[in-house]
């Protein structure tokens, strides 16, 4: 054993390795990405690791491994769980042989997501047990418990960590590589009565699942990580007010009470199946309980149910009563304020007098990087379509930032791959609109292909614009089918986007470097002359993986101060110095797009 200072996601990955995981698959998405990356980096040599094309593919591949008796881990963020829901809902009815842990990273805030969806609620919906760690160390230890639990009960399990656990750091003790468990998979044993889902089997297994989860509710009341923390000795709160909490919020609560007296606290580490008997024991002598939780009022609703079932007259407070914010991320400060109000004790509030007069931090909205090829792609389409009625469907990726001024080239963004289908719907309602659908190369493989097939089959008239920067840039430059390498470092044949589109049946498929602005504009114009589905592939590598040594420079004497370079491009490397444009050399990557926009020819290398 040895100590390491680890990020939560690293601890989760090492926990899986130490538990003898055999198979790991996932799709990148903040805040989950580092789990699979850490497995790949620390792979002792006997673990298969892959970045799957999407979460559905990852879930199904992991299910196959678990059917064969392997220990399988699948990773994703909360919105990725929606993509994986189709196989998951049936998988719970089938069950697994080897342990299968579904690591889902929830994103309260949200910090980098479309939604604040709560996987605890999804657990109850899908009837899948869920583990909810409260710290980096607990996340590490709980991973082995999750695998053991999964194998014992023959069910996949959720392992739900939120951003502050995923990206928090802690010094924890972990085993050396030679101390990792070894788990040998026995292989797939044919049994159609078990692994082939038919209605009759579903009815039978549904009943078994309900019976099992009722039993698990009792079993989990004795699970050591679900516990009642007694009130501190001599606490004035004994017997009437108490707190129920979970996950990182338990850590926040304990931070607020550090060195102070505290009431009785119920910590829920497995919110589904809910530990009813433990909760009933906790509630029996209380007048009020405050539920401190993020996202959905899962514990609050469960305690209200327990009160009704066991005939308890306890007032349950939390999100539903307005004591805890209904949305957004909690913090030590917000929890301290809620506890101070609930316990009528202002000494619990976080007070830092030296910070009172500090100015607010400036707002720093996300922007496309200086030299990002997506800027050139958007600008080329905008110039080609000047004066025409056009719709620009966006998608999930760095290029969603194309919605910001001055580009304003992202009219909608829903979920991965949706932009292509949304463009079809808009064109059907407004056939005089020139409809464009922007999609990144990674998103194209993850969920864009079906949209193109749908558009071609149903004879839509739209332009697909594939923004190919040769990486999955938004989540940290993971490989994908078009990058020519795998998560395990293997060099493989690239999947050609051009060949895929031509195989679907598209007759106009052209690839152009968006930084060749004149040619890029001409390509878009020619695409518009073709009826049906046509594709323009803008291919230029992300500046984070391939940078030029060039720098742009402004000739101050030639600059006429028109600000066109600033007002039309919005590149963070271009600033004003007086009335003249100036290039910030520390940010400039030498894409030279600005030189092609400048009407005075004042910008050069």
Image (cartoon, rainbow, N blue to C red):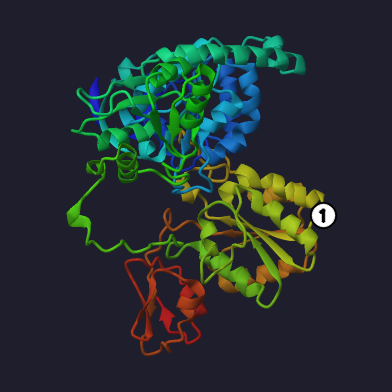
Residue 136, picture quadrant: top left
Q: Can you identify the residue that label 1 sits on? A: 459
Q: Nearer the viewer, residue 562 or 519?
A: 562
Residue found 33% across the figure and 85% down from its top = 578
Q: Is residue 149 above or below residue 58?
A: above
Q: Is residue 390 above or below residue 245?
A: below
Query: Residue 107: percent from the left, percent from the top?
Result: 46, 42
Query: Residue 176: percent from the left, percent from the top?
Result: 28, 20
Residue found 55% across the figure and 23% down from its top = 128
Query: Residue 192: percent from the left, percent from the top?
Result: 71, 12
Residue 433, picture quadrant: bottom right
Q: Is residue 530 above or below residue 295?
A: below
Q: Nearer the viewer, residue 409 or 446?
A: 409
State the SS at label 1.
loop
**How dense is the environment of label 1, judged by Cα within 10 Å: few (below 14), some, or many (20 and up)?**
few
Query: Residue 19: percent from the left, percent from the top?
Result: 40, 18
Quadrant in which the C terminus is drawn: bottom left
Residue found 31% across the figure and 17% down from its top = 178
Residue found 53% across the figure and 15% down from its top = 98
Residue 335 is left or right of residue 59, and the answer is: left
Q: Could you tell me if residue 319 is visible in this image?
A: yes
Quadrant in which the N terminus is drawn: top left
Q: Could you tell me if residue 6 is visible in this image?
A: no
Report the label total.
Answer: 1
């Amino acid at each position: 054993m040895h100590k390491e200072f680890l990020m939560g996601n690293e601890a989760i990955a090492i926990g899986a390795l130490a538990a003898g995981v055999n198979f790991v698959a996932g799709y990148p998405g903040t805040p989950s990405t580092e789990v699979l990356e850490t497995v790949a980096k620390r792979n002792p040599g006997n673990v298969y690791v892959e970045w799957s094309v999407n979460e559905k593919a990852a879930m199904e591949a992991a299910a196959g491994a678990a059917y064969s008796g392997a220990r399988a881990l699948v990773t994703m963020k909360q919105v990725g769980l929606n993509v994986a829901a189709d196989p998951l809902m049936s998988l719970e009815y089938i069950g697994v042989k080897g342990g299968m842990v579904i690591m889902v990273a929830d994103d309260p805030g949200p910090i980098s997501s479309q939604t604040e969806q709560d996987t605890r609620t999804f657990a109850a919906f899908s009837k899948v047990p869920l583990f909810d760690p409260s710290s980096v160390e607990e996340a590490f230890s709980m991973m082995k418990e999750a695998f053991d639990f999964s194998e014992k009960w023959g069910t996949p399990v959720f392992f739900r960590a939120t951003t502050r656990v995923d990206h928090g750091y802690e010094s924890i003790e972990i085993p050396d590589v030679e101390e990792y468990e070894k788990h040998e998979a026995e292989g797939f044993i044919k049994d159609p009565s078990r692994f082939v889902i038919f209605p009759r089997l579903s009815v039978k297994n549904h009943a078994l699942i309900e019976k099992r989860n009722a039993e698990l509710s009792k079993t989990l009341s004795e699970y050591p990580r679900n516990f009642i923390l007694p009130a501190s000795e001599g606490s004035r709160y004994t017997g009437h007010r108490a707190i129920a909490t979970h996950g990182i919020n338990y850590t926040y609560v304990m931070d607020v009470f550090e060195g102070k007296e505290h009431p009785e606290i119920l910590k829920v580490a497995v919110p589904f199946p809910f530990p009813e008997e433990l909760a009933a024991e906790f509630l029996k002598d209380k007048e009020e309980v405050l539920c401190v939780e993020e996202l959905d009022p899962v514990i609050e609703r469960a305690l209200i149910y327990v009160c009704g079932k066991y005939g308890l007259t306890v007032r349950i407070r939390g999100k539903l009563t307005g004591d805890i914010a209904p949305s957004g991320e909690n913090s030590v400060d917000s929890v301290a304020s809620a506890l101070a109000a609930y316990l009528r004790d202002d000494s619990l509030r976080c007070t830092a007098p030296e910070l009172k007069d500090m100015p607010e931090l400036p707002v720093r909205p996300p922007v496309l990087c200086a030299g990002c090829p997506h800027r050139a792609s958007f600008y080329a389409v905008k110039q080609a379509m000047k004066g025409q009625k056009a719709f620009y469907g966006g998608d999930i990726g760095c290029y969603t930032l194309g919605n910001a001024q001055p580009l304003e080239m992202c009219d909608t963004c829903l979920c991965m791959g949706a932009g292509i289908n949304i463009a079809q719907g808009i064109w059907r309602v407004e056939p005089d609109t020139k409809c464009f659908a922007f999609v990144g190369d990674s998103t194209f493989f993850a969920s864009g292909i079906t949209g193109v097939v749908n558009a071609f089959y149903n004879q839509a008239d739209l332009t697909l614009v594939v923004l190919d920067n040769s990486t999955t840039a938004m989540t940290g430059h993971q490989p994908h089918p078009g990058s020519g390498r795998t998560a395990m470092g293997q060099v493989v044949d690239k999947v050609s986007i051009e060949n895929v589109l031509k195989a679907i049946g598209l007759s106009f498929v052209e690839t152009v470097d968006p930084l060749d602005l004149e040619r890029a504009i001409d390509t878009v114009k020619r695409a518009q002359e073709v009826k049906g589905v046509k594709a323009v592939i803008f291919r230029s590598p992300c500046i984070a993986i391939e940078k030029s040594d060039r720098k742009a420079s402004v000739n101050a004497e030639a600059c006429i101060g028109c600000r066109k370079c600033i007002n039309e491009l919005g590149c963070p490397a271009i600033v004003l110095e007086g009335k003249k444009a100036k290039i910030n050399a520390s940010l400039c990557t030498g894409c030279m797009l600005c030189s092609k926009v400048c009407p005075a020819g004042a910008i050069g290398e």
